Amino acid sequence: MPEQSADALFAPFNLGPITLANRIVMAPLTRNRATHGTDVPHELNATYYSQRATAGLLIAEATQISPTGKGYAWTPGIYSPEQVAGWRLVTTAVHAKGGKIFLQLWHVGRFSHPALQPGGQLPVAPSAIAPVDQKTFLEDGTFAPVGTPRALERSEIAGIVDDYRTATRNALDAGFDGVEIHAANGYLVDQFLRDGANKRTDDYGGSVANRLRFAQEVIAAVSEIAGPERTGIRISPVSPASGLSDSDPSAVFFPLVDAIDAAGLVYVHVIEGATGGPRDVAPFDYHALRKRFRGAWLVNNGYTRETAIDAIASGYADLVAFGKPFIANPDLVERLRRNAPLNALDTEHLFGGGAQGYTDYPALESAAR
Ligand code: 8OZ
């Protein structure tokens, strides 16, 4: 491939009302470094994100919209005034460096544990079906099986949709440029979509149209507050993440993307293959999916400099998200520009802890010393 086509990756992009400096996006990455006990973001988190502000867009890590939306120790929330103030530190630091940042809105559904839930209650889900052989980790640092959730009463669902609305308002108050609905990786929205996790007999389960209902209500609620032009969504059509199963992903995700298109969301963020794993885990026609959406197409999973350039230059994608490379390389954009070597990932300090393996990765100049 001629080197000049690399320019495609570094060209600005208009994402709704905001202009991104380049096509490189920092994927949302769970790091479990919020304040213990309150799930409030703090200065260290602001440093981490601002170090990476040269990304065209940062998508801040999955953030629970309510106490019941939590499934792991020390993940941040966006439902208390203290959390909003903590996130404001992050957005202010990123904006000071000229960056743009969205917040990923998260409800884990069944992927939780009573010890992480208010009042030690069971986690909630579309149906009382446990994920297969899944563990999470608790605030005492131990791992525990996620167990069987409680099926939501139909009358409870509108309250959760309302929590998305409130969380969106809070995210905007905190200074985010927009929000991403987390509909991927086996969490609550994904659980409603899949026939392996959703066995409801009311109008939220059964037919594809019914299984899409919750996602569509969340999309409507979030975009009512943020505007569709500041609302994106992340999906993972074939990822077996969190032990999720589904008999026919195309039957769900083609009409879902049609609904996202009709709602006018600004981007679809698609994880191709198994999240953080093999891209070829199951066949799926991503190009056909892409053709159904008129907005920006953001792709993710195992992209390299070469495959990212190709995805943009060929016109398949508008934006490419990088996960692990952004953890280890705060200046990933500059490294990709120069085709410079990347730092190795410190896998010991991914989840929880302090600055080590978080804000201490060297940028190019200091790496060269
Ligand atoms: C890794 C560990 C915990 C959570 C996801 C939010 O997969 C996550 C997550 C990833 O979307």
Image (cartoon, grey):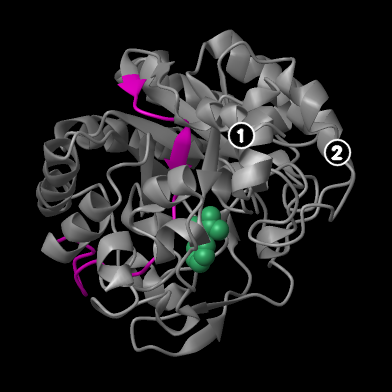
- Residue placed under numbered mark 2 in the picture: 284
Q: Residue 257 — which label?
A: none
Q: Amino acid at mark 2?
A: Phe
Q: Does the magenta portion include 26? A: yes
Q: Amino acid at mark 1?
A: Glu
Q: Quadrant of residue 141?
A: bottom left
Q: Quadrant of residue 100?
A: top left
Q: Nearer the viewer, residue 254 or 188?
A: 254
Q: Position of residue 12 (x, y in %)?
A: 40, 21
Q: Mark 1: is the Cβ under 8 angstroms from ligand 1?
A: no
Asked if one can make out residue 197 in the rendered structure from this viewpoint, the answer is yes
Count of labels in the image: 2
Image marks 1 and 2: residues in contact by CB distance under 8 Å: no
Q: Secondary structure at mark 2?
A: loop
Q: Say above or below: 315 vs 78.
A: above
**Quarter holding the C terminus?**
bottom left
Bounds of the magenta segment: 19-42
Say whether residue 256 is left or right of residue 68.
right
Q: Say above or below: 1 vs 339.
A: above
